[in-house]
């Protein structure tokens, strides 16, 4: 049974009143009755509806009766009596409502138009949801097809997320609202690195109709940092090696001595002045990410499934490199984008996926 928060929430049957007796411009009638649905995540079952109307200009209104019915042929029921020109009906709305004016003696003196709520009149679901893995965050973006379908009625997007069951490879049913936005993008921050979540987006019209959801998207935040600074072994041996994660101290992005046997790689200068990444221990292999420069660290999407080797690779400005790092808990993937190279050191941005076996470094379109 539906329950009202306002006065007199009884469901009192009223004689059918399909032909309202008030004239369109009756000064005693509530005018401009409109509704605003309250989205719930289920397009077919909003969490409520807010009805609003103008106070009759005659000044005789003392209160209002709000009526509803389950179909255009059903009996009308009194939903509530209120002194406010609004009514919030909780739960899935009835298909039709109207409002009547009561005078100081409690007599109904005029009626509004009938308002019909059609839950199928909604925008299309957003398409093309993609994501970018960031440090303790995920950036989402999608197509503007919902806006383009109806510029005049689009209002905003709702962004949802749920946990991910890795053992079954499915998104769980504990979906929650992450937030809303009017743009075709959303940044979900304060996430836990290495913990996967599923995301989906819906579009909401100005009267509160919510679309069906986009396809779900899985993403896993990963650790990153910018402007790491590592010398060559010839220039400064005690700062010529790097570990994405130092297991002993649980420190990410540790710069240390090239003589340490537990760091992931060192930087060496060849006779021609070029600088090279060199694997620092067994269990570390690497490969170039692409044969062209990348714009930024976030351009590095997923670690390749093959092609890694225990070989030295030249460090070139603007180019990216992917590492396969074996740890006690399994294989981890990491990435580097070189910012610039000098004769004695390199500066680079890096990312590390703390989830064992997860190749996500930055999820982007098509991945």
Image (spheres, rainbow, N blue to C red):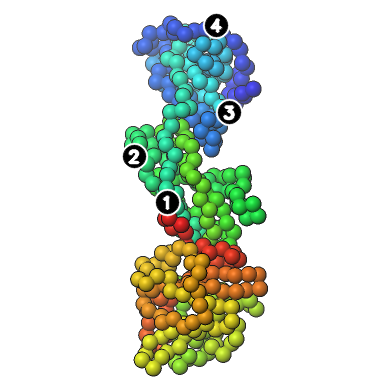
Label for residue 62?
A: none
Question: Between tags 2 and 3, which lies in front?
Answer: 2
Label for residue 15?
A: 4
Do the residues bearing badges 4 and 1 touch, measured as CB atoms within 8 Å?
A: no
Locate the N terminus by quadrant. Answer: top right
Q: Earlier in the sequence, mark 4 or mark 3?
A: 4
Q: Residue at x 46, y 28 (%)?
A: 120
Q: Is residue 118 visible to the viewer in this orientation of the structure?
A: yes
Q: CA distance from mark 2 to mark 1?
A: 16 Å
Do the residues bearing badges 2 and 3 touch, measured as CB atoms within 8 Å?
A: no
- The answer to whether 310 is drawn above or below residue 192 in the figure is below
Q: CA distance from mark 4 to mark 3?
A: 24 Å
Q: Which residue is mark 3?
A: 91
Of 177 and 354, the residue lying toward us: 354
Other-residue count near label 2 (Cα within 10 Å), few / some / many at <14 / 14–19 / ≥20: few
Other-residue count near label 3 (Cα within 10 Å), few / some / many at <14 / 14–19 / ≥20: some
Q: Earlier in the sequence, mark 2 or mark 1?
A: 1
Other-residue count near label 1 (Cα within 10 Å), few / some / many at <14 / 14–19 / ≥20: many
Other-residue count near label 4 (Cα within 10 Å), few / some / many at <14 / 14–19 / ≥20: few
Q: Residue at x 43, y 55 (%)?
A: 366
Q: CA distance from mark 2 to mark 3?
A: 30 Å
Q: Residue at x 62, y 74 (%)?
A: 327
Give how far across and how far down residue 264 sits, in percent: 55, 80
Label for residue 148?
A: 2
Residue 259 is drawn in which quadrant? bottom right
Q: Earlier in the sequence, mark 3 or mark 1?
A: 3
Question: Between tags 3 and 1, which lies in front?
Answer: 1
């Amino acid at each position: 049974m539906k329950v009202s928060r306002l006065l007199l929430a009884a469901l009192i049957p009223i004689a059918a009143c399909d032909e309202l007796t008030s004239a369109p411009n009756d000064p005693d009638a509530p005018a401009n009755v409109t509704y605003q649905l309250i989205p719930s995540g289920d397009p077919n079952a909003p969490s409520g509806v807010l009805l609003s109307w103008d106070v009759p200009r005659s000044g005789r209104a003392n209160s209002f009766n709000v009526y509803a019915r389950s179909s255009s042929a059903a009996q009308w029921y009194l939903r509530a009596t209120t002194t406010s020109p609004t009514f919030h009906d909780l739960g899935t709305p009835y298909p039709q409502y109207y409002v009547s004016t009561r005078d100081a003696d409690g007599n109904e003196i005029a009626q509004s138009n009938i308002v019909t709520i059609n839950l199928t009149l909604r925008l299309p679901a957003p398409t093309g949801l993609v994501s970018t893995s960031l440090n303790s965050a995920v950036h989402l973006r999608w197509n503007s097809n919902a806006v383009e379908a109806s510029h005049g009625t689009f209002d905003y997007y709702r962004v949802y997320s749920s946990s991910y069951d890795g053992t079954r490879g499915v998104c769980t049913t504990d979906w929650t609202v992450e937030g809303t936005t009017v743009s075709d993008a959303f940044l979900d921050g304060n996430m836990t690195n290495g913990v996967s979540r599923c995301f989906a987006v819906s579009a909401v019209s100005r009267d509160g109709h919510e679309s069906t959801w986009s396809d779900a998207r899985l993403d896993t935040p990963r650790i990153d940092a910018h402007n790491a600074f590592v010398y060559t072994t010839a220039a400064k041996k005690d700062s010529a090696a790097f570990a994405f994660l130092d297991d002993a101290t649980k420190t990410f992005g540790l710069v240390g001595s090239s003589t340490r046997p537990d760091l992931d790689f060192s930087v060496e200068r060849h006779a021609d002045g070029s600088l090279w990444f060199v694997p620092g221990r067994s269990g570390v292999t690497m490969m170039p990410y692409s044969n062209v420069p990348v714009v930024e660290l976030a351009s590095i999407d997923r670690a390749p499934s093959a092609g890694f080797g225990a070989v030295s690779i030249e460090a070139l400005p603007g180019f990216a490199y992917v590492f396969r790092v074996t740890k006690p808990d399994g294989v981890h993937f990491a990435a580097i984008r070189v910012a610039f190279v000098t004769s004695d050191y390199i500066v680079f941005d890096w990312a590390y996926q703390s989830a064992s076996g997860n190749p996500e470094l930055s999820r982007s379109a098509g991945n």
